[in-house]
Amino acid sequence: MAEDNNEEATVKQKLSKLFETSLKLTLPDEPPIKPELAKGKFADYQCNNAMDCWKKVQGKTTEFQGPPSLGQAIKNNLPESEMIESCSVAGPGFVNVTLSDRWIAKNIQKMLQKGIGIWAPKLGVSRVVVDFSSPNIAKEMHVGHLRSTIIGDTIARMLEYSNVEVLRRNHVGDWGTQFGMLIEYLFEMFPDWENAGEQAIGDLQAFYKASKLKFDDDPDFKEKAQEAVVLLQGGDEKYRKAWSTICEISRQEFDKVYKRLGVSLEEKGESFYNPYIPKVVELLNNQGLVVINKGARVIFLEGVKIPLIIVKSNGGYNYASTDLTALWYRLNEEKAEWIVYVAGDTQNDHFKMFFTAAKCAGWLPADKNLYPKTSHLKFGQVLGEDGKPFKTRSGVVVRLVDLLDEAKTRCKNELVERGRAEEWTAEELEQIAEAIGYGAVKYADLKNNRETKYTFSFDQMLNDKGDTAVYLQYAHARICSIIRKSGKDIEELKKTGIIVLDHGEERALDDAEERALALQRTLALHLIQFAEVVEEACLKLLPSILCEYLYNLSEHFTKFYSVCRVVGSPEETSRLLLCEATAVVMRQCFHLLGIVPVYKI
Ligand code: ARG
């Protein structure tokens, strides 16, 4: 019997291995065939290879009469395995697989004993840069940056769970012509800036606006600002110091948001790559890729009319010069195999163009399925309930901190209304309101297919019914309370208890018993599919896949619990362990989505 010794592989991968062997045995003269497995409609999984295989061998052999007989052979050649209960062939050769109840139960027990880490998928990539959040200095972080921060953090968390080394990069916009104007304004308005710098500036956004007004209105100031850029980029000490003072104030503001969201990032802003740009331009130039066009140094790309400018006609560098250089750095210095850019879909053209340039330079393979590779994880705009870009009533950009505050306040009010202020300590009330509120904002964003625009609505995201984080938090808290009420030591049960999914009795079951068993098995099967769901969400860069899994998990649990008595039933131990496994997997989903679970509501 095939040994089940590869603990980390997903169920799908394990089955895939068995089918690989079978396909080799069935068609020994063909080159290796990749098994095509899908979650089955009529069984747990289904193997769909027979039709394609038939096309390959038709006319070459008399051994098979068509897809069904090929399917039959694939089934017969499957190595024996404890994971499979039964197989059947249907239609044009689909091989339907039903997993063994015992094996499913054993798998869950093993996870409970060894921890959820054993369900981490193996992705076949070891180091990934996730470039996310990346706001611009002196400008407020807005809802677009919120999307990038939330989505990027989840991608990073899922990869980290899958034992990938993740470089969480904050590519902040800390370099560019706007600094000339900011620095010059600082010198004029706050002559004492070196002593009182940060306090003097105060609200950086207002500072930015005021300096921009002056820049647009006052030609003398404009000229000075332009000179300031040259001085700054030339490394003048005083200008550098002013620049870093301004950056530091922004950084402190950004950090407050990251702290609240529980997101960690390492800043390597645009300025970091500046010293490397000339070398990279030279490299591309030596390859014959760079031409002079209207005074600028550009790269012409096949099929695109407008060239990619890498050095402006005045000799300055731009967004593309920095991104190309950052890519070079990430590939050569940081040795990343995959670089994921989490940025809005308004930047599609930018990413497409510099990715193509990197391919022309031979930095990336032409085949996009091979490493090293780059991906632009794009997302749609955030809309208000009026269907227009999300703004406050007075038409200004909504500040991120205000959104988080409001989510928390609304949750707190709700909890107070339910009388929790009397039951809990003030600290508990704060923490739980925050976990639910911030979690709701994150989940509402993540559950959507990220490429579509999404409408920001507090009423929707804070609803305790439907597909919301609030509903999911309730579901989780309820499971915790079932376990608490049992009075059993769950840690002890994990060590000694056994999960039983089959009834193990000879007598026929009545309908209600059949139904209970079926619902219990559906829940258990869903649990062991966790690893392959995370794998798919990582490889497709789609957090929504994990959200859907989590929501379905909670639905499966609700159905199970509505017909299966847990506490005080003859199956109490087994069912409590299923409850615990559900709670563990839910918590891991929450963790990957950056949501803090609550144990009571
Ligand atoms: N700072 C940019 C913005 O606010 C996002 C940067 C995305 N990352 C990158 N490597 N270009 O739109």
Image (cartoon, helix red, strand yellow):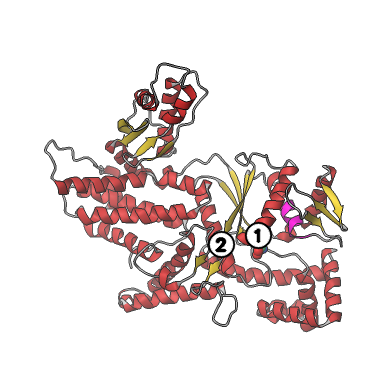
Dot 1 alpha-carbon crowd within 10 angstroms: few under 14, some 14 to 19, many 20 or more: few
Question: Does the rendering let one see residue 191?
Answer: no
Q: Is residue 271 visible?
A: yes
For the residue labelled by badge 2, is the local secondary structure a helix, a strand or a loop? loop
Q: Is residue 443 above or below residue 2?
A: below
Q: Which residue is depicted at the point 37% across and 36% down? A: 46
Q: Residue at x 20, y 48 (%)?
A: 515
Predominant secondary structure in magenta? helix
Please state the extent of the stretch shown in magenta in the rendering. Answer: 318-325
Q: Residues within 10 Å of mark 2 (few under 14, many from 20)?
A: some
Mark 1 = which residue? 347
Label 2 sits on residue: 380
- Identified by mark 2, the residue type is Gly
Q: Residue furthest top?
A: 62
Residue located 71% across and 51% down the image: 354
Left or right of 41: which side holds 133?
A: right
Residue 37 x %, y %: 42, 36
Which quadrant of the figure has residue 336? top right
Q: Within the image, what quadrant is residue 77 found in? A: top left
Q: Is mark 1 within 8 Å of ligand 1?
A: yes
